[in-house]
Image (cartoon, rainbow, N blue to C red):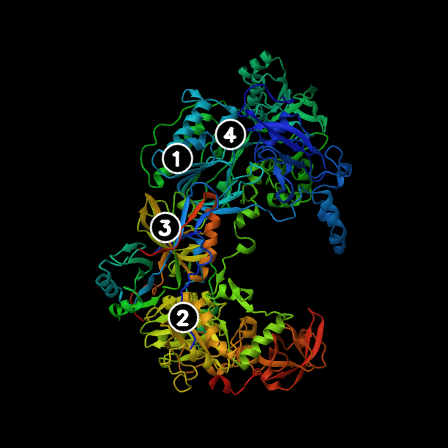
Amino acid sequence: MTSHRLSSGGLIDRSAPLNFRFDGKSYSGFKGDTLASALVANGVKLVGRSFKYHRPRGILTAGSEEPNALIELRSGARREPNTKATTAELYEGLEAASQNRWPSLNFDVMSVNQLFAPIFVAGFYYKTFMWPAKFWEAIYEPAIRRAAGLGRAAGIADPDYYDKAWAHYDVLIAGSGPTGLAAALAAGRTGARVILCEEDFTPGGRLIADGGTIDGMPAAEWLSRTLAELGSLPDVRIMTRTTLFGVYDGGTYGAIERVNDHVPSPPEHQVRQRLWRIVAKRCVVAAGALERPIVFAGNDAPGVMMASAMRSYIARYAAAPAKRMALFTNNEDGWRTVETALGAGLQVAAVIDARAEISPAHRSLASKGGFPVLHGSVSGIDGGKNGVRKISVSLTGGARAEVEADGLAVSGGWNPTVGLTSYHRGRPKWRDDIAAFVPDGAPPGMVAAGAANGAFGLGACLREGFAAGVTAARDAGHGNGSGSTPVADDEAFSLTPLWHVAGKGKAFVDQQHDVTASDIELAQREGFESVEHLKRYTTLGMATDQGKTSNVAGLAIMAAVTGKSIPETGTTIYRPPYVPVAIGAFAGHHRDETFHATRLTPSHHWAAEQGAIFVDTGLWKRAQWYPRAGEKDWLESVTREVKAVRGGVGFCDVSTLGKIDVHGADAGAFLDRVYINTFSNLAVGKARYGLMLREDGIVYDDGTTSRLAEDHYFLTTTTAKAGLVMQHLEFCRQVLFPELDVQLTSVSDQWAQFSIAGPKTRDLLKEIVDPSEDLSNEGFPFMGAREVALRGGVKARLFRISFSGEMAFEISVPARYGEAMARNLMIAGHPFGVTPYGTEALGVMRIEKGHVAGPELSGTTTAADLGLGKMMSTKKDFIGRVMAGREALIAADRQVVVGIKPTDKARRLRSGAHIIPKGQTPGPDNDQGYVTSVCFSPTSDHWIGLALVERGRERIGEIVHAHDPLRGEDYDVEICNPVFYDPDGGRQRG
Amino acid sequence: MRIICPFCGERELGEFTYLGDAKPVRPAADAGEDAVYDYVYLRDNIAGVMDENWYHGGGCRAWLKVTRNTLTHEISGVEAAAGAGARQVAK
Amino acid sequence: MAEFSWETRSPLDRALVAGPNGASGDAGVSLTEIRNFDLVQVMARRGKAAEMAEAAKARFGVAAPETPNAVGAADATLIWSGPDQFLALSTGGKHSIEALAPGFTGSASLSDQSHARVLISISGAKARTMLAKLSSIDLHPDVFGVGAAAATSMDHTSVTLWRGADRDGQAVFNLLVFATFAESLWHTILDSAAEYGVEIGHPEELA
């Protein structure tokens, strides 16, 4: 038996011992222990060093509000810093290490910071490190980061899997104490769908440690009966290890379920944690209250513990934080700890009660237990890293006393958990009778009940919880059947507010951030009186515990020094999450290769078989080039592909283009309004290039649209804008022009579309297209579009359009034929040396041809900038027409698309280089544009590019300077016609 | 946030795309540059209740006019755009 | 003259590997693909919703759904896909776009979606639990009963979801997903279902 383990009692499984290591030393505990309770049972008092002063710290609480006992849990890739020992469940082989100490917890070099304590006051960093600025990064920050701080992140990728899920319920209950269970019974019995989230791994809340009598039976029996009944209801779900951390709009709540944090690593195929988005019609906050400390000198010493936590360790875990404890209380409830300790056979050294009066029952308990009751306050603690030894007491009336004890339980009263109810900028209200903030309203659909609402008696919790459950179920549409309210007595309540005992020595308010009472007083003296300023200046409440044990005490001290009341001083804004939530849980499976969904083209797997290199284009994987054996780099492959197309024939999967069926009697009129050019006069069987503007006159998207029937157009968009154009067109159809008879359907995924290009395109097509189809220049002229039969019976759509400047067609087949189409193009084209090409070669050929694409459709260019101004119809209204005519958009000195070529033909061009007039020093005053697209042109045998250049079209032949400060390059380029290849277009029409 | 799509029922925010103020009406073709300028650039930015255009792109693809309080996110009304579905709409 | 083979290939052709997947033991999720179907988007012309409804009734013998539901006809399933529109799912060419076109002339616009979507069938004791990871909508049987349908999103991907007839006393969820997203979503489904154990069935023909 370990040194501080009680011989009987508790909810631990003594038949299941567990071995664990803390700071390399071996200990044992039991199943049902937390790491904190197991350390308590082993008599370990020193658990960590504090953030700023490296003071020795122990365990303050038994829950998720813990500011001190933060450890690094696990090792390697699973190492998790700042884990609360008080909520970490013990498992066999658990490894934990203390934080913020060097070289060891017992001998910490940085504890010399305590000697410099006078300088580490509030605002220290702001005051000291303001100047010179460059010292901050180089010297101050690294030094401070070494000295201060918390745990270390693993630094390598988390190997575990996290996921996310949705849940839908009528009634959501936060907390499984008496309030939450009563609410669950009341709501669940009506048939309502109920979900109850409990942070702990065991339901019951304070019932577990504090017991009581409910409906005439011991609390433990009532608890097990209640859980059995709730378990029998099919639509009631109790989730333990699940913290409700936030409330969002429309009845949406966030919860984090620690599915496998209580085992060394998740079993195969299981997740570590799951993030729940719970949609609930009603929510009952039964999250209880947190006991609050009293601030006094030395209150951070190991062995000083919240009174309720001490009860939990004794009653729930059969672990004695102290063998001879003292209690410092200002209220009736603190005395329960004395009862619990005595009941467990532990000694009580003294009770220090700040109240003037104590109840006769407690007075007789003291005489029976043989310990003194001292009226006064604790003014100091004698004890170092090994814990409390002696307690100094200032007695009412001025005398002093000392108490020898090995632990001090502190109770300053209880603060209702007001986070969830305040997350929509709600401010809690002050109640003088309990000296605490309680919720003042809540987000829609939410109500607080029980201790979370300031009702501290067991009977009151049950009544409020039950009533809240009845109401919540009824509001969610479920009627009767709640049965009767569980009954229990209400304990006496008596509290004399006491926040801070003045005295010599550091008295800590926020123990995690090492904020002392004198820091708050200093902040006030320096003018930071507002609570929001106080918080930021002192960092009070800004640590990972979000000030759960410190905020109210901090503002009470501020109230005292300013002479205001606590409610006048007010609270800061509450924000989720209630507890820290791992980023991994928010990401779920969206990481690495599954960061986002992936779209695959119909010929993807065929291209992969060919060894294609793929590039991510939005969600798509596209074949970028097809390397062949012996090719030394991408440029060699791409150059070969371009030459093969220009000299023979090649094909490329262009299925990623957005494709939209536009149907309806008014389809032509509709397209006339969304494109700058006219489509209503397009003949059936013809395609036309179209340009779309935004309403502000800037180019939005482009693509070819074909008329397949009188009332049916087939519209294509760029790959990048496919979804946005669909959304835009639906807006035009539904909101702007609802009178038109138009229907839109995305057919992007219906068709596998290939571009076939090169002088031998027609030869290839003749092989694969049914011989009855006339593919001659007369039978299928440039910009023709119609359905054709392929050999073997499959029907395809054929479009005579060219992006490459070559004789070219695009051919569409239903998508499940896409892979067969690629194979058949290889067969049909074999005699002509057909070459599959990727997006790089596609890009090279469009630059050679001077076609604009994404880099030129940059959201700043007009149709005229792109050289397409003549397309703009003057005979109709269209989106962007009026704004496109604004002075600045038609100014003569706009930057327009031109071609560029290097004067030194061996020079490589790069996108992004700035265009500067020759002979001038680069700078913002003479910046005349930039290079948008570049490629090595196999046709020209040197690099070429497109650029946006001021008055560019008037400057053909001018030598300008390309300035690329990013890459440190400067060189001359000649402005030229953007159409480098076949400028009169003979090849594509041939 | 959750929006009750008149066609699909209540759905979560992720299915919708926000466009903005639903009040401006696209001017007639001959309204002149000032009117179009106002339509394109002038937006109310109300701290309170306003009508907004939202697109149910992750669902039925209907455009919706959502009446929302920008301070509380309370949604007090949702109606479909005139041209959602096939209803005849007078010019 | 070269010989061409026009074999169709499902977008899930490589991804679907029949057999057990994920956790061992009784599979909580059964998963397979339904292949070979005709799927036609039918959208009413402006002002012609009533005419479209009449044409649908005449063609399929049942009223097309006007709310998010899937309606079973003798030889087709009509699935709501938005206001005044539905998808007609059938097999064997009986209700292909060519077959449907004459009956809907003037009342509706038709768009072939047969190759644009992949149909995935999800069932098993843990099907709903697994789908809660992918779908933000409430699939509780009281809310999403047999025949309920939804145009919604899974993993930021648009899908059409409907509940078919129960099989062995368990709910069957049918999922139409865009073809180019199908392999990606299939892997996401397998990821989500792994902890419950998955039985991946051989692809089935549409019944």
**Would you name the residue on which mark 1 appears?**
A469
**Would you name the residue on which mark 3 appears?**
C173
**Left or right placement of residue A639 versus residue A452 in this view:** right
Q: Mark 3 and mark 4, same subunit? A: no
The chain identifier of the residue carrying mark 2 reads A
- Between the C-alphas of marks 1 and 4, the distance is 26 Å
Q: Residues within 10 Å of mark 4 (few under 14, many from 20)?
A: few
For the point 38% across and 85% down, the residue is A779
Check the image and report above or below for A625 versus A166: below
Please say whether residue A248 is visible from this viewpoint.
no
Please name whichever residue, A339 or A767, is drawn nearer the observer in this view of the structure: A767
Q: Amino acid at mark 1?
A: Gly
Q: Mark 1 and mark 4, same subunit? A: yes
Q: Quadrant of residue A39?
A: top right
Please name whichever residue, A376 or A371, is drawn nearer the observer in this view of the structure: A371
Q: Can you tell which of label 2 and label 4 is closer to the viewer?
A: 2
Q: Quadrant of residue A22?
A: top right
Q: Amino acid at mark 2?
A: Val
Q: Earlier in the sequence, mark 1 or mark 2?
A: 1
Disc 4, SS: loop
How many tags in the picture? 4
Check the image and report above or below for A879 versus C42: below
**Would you name the residue on which mark 2 appears?**
A813
Q: Amino acid at mark 3?
A: Phe
- Between the C-alphas of marks 3 and 2, the distance is 30 Å
Q: Mark 1 and mark 2, same subunit? A: yes
